[in-house]
C-alpha cells in the first residue's frame, strides 16, 4: 500500500491545462470538454445524503477499453466507508464499489433503467 507520494512523482503529473490541451480537438481549442450529467449532481447528493451507502461507483464501457483495470484502480483508490460497512465480508463489494453498473459493464447505455444484469441483486 502506498501511503506517501514524493515530490518527484507530483512534478510528473500534468496540470489541468495540459490535460485539456491534450484531449481537445485541434479545430476547437477554446472549448472545454463536454461532461454529461453535471446537472444531476445536486439531485444525487440530496438523494444519498440521508443514506451514504446508496452512493456507489462502477465502471462501464466498451470491450477492451480498460473497464477491468478501472475497477481494480477504484478498489485500491476510491473506497466508500459507508458501503464497506454495509457489505463487509462480501468479496465483490467489500471495498465499497461495484464491479459493474446494474445494466452490465459492457451493455450499451440505452439499456439503463430497462435492463438489470441480476434482478436479485440489491443496488
Image (tube, grey):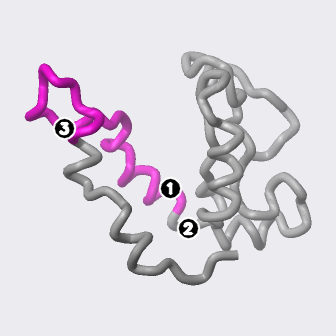
- Vertically, is 20 above or below 12? above
Q: Nearer the viewer, mark 2 or mark 3?
A: 3
Identify which residue is drawn at 29% across, 34% down. 23
Q: Do tag 2 and tag 3 residues touch (Cβ < 8 Å)?
A: no
Q: Which residues are magenta?
A: 21-48
Q: Are marks 2 and 1 in contact (CB under 8 Å)?
A: yes
Left or right: where does residue 27 sit relative to residue 80?
left
Q: Quadrant of residue 82?
A: bottom right
Q: Nearer the viewer, residue 61 or 54?
A: 61
Give the mark nearer the N terminus: 2 vs 3: 3
Secondary structure of residue under mark 2: loop
Residue for badge 1: 47
- The residue pinned by badge 2 equals 50
Q: Which residue is mark 3?
A: 32
**Closer to the camera in the image, 62 or 40:** 62
Left or right: residue 99 versus residue 9 is right
Which mark's residue is nearer the viewer, 3 or 1?
3
Q: x, y (%) of residue 105?
A: 69, 30
| Mark 3 neighbour class, 10 Å CA radius: few under 14, some 14 to 19, many 20 or more | few
> In this rendering, is residue 74 above or below 3?
above
Q: Is residue 70 above or below residue 89?
A: above
Amino acid at each position: 500500500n502506498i501511503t506517501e507520494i514524493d515530490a518527484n512523482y507530483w512534478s510528473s503529473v500534468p496540470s489541468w491545462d495540459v490535460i485539456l490541451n491534450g484531449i481537445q480537438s485541434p479545430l476547437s481549442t477554446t472549448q472545454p470538454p463536454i461532461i454529461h450529467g453535471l446537472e444531476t449532481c445536486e439531485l444525487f447528493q440530496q438523494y444519498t445524503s440521508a443514506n451514504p451507502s446508496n452512493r456507489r461507483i462502477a465502471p462501464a464501457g466498451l470491450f477492451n477499453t480498460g473497464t477491468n483495470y478501472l475497477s481494480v484502480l477504484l478498489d485500491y483508490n476510491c473506497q466508500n466507508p459507508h458501503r464497506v460497512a454495509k457489505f463487509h465480508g462480501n468479496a465483490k463489494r467489500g471495498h465499497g464499489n461495484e464491479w459493474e453498473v446494474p445494466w452490465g459493464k459492457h451493455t450499451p447505455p440505452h439499456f439503463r433503467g430497462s435492463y438489470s444484469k441480476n434482478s436479485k441483486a440489491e443496488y
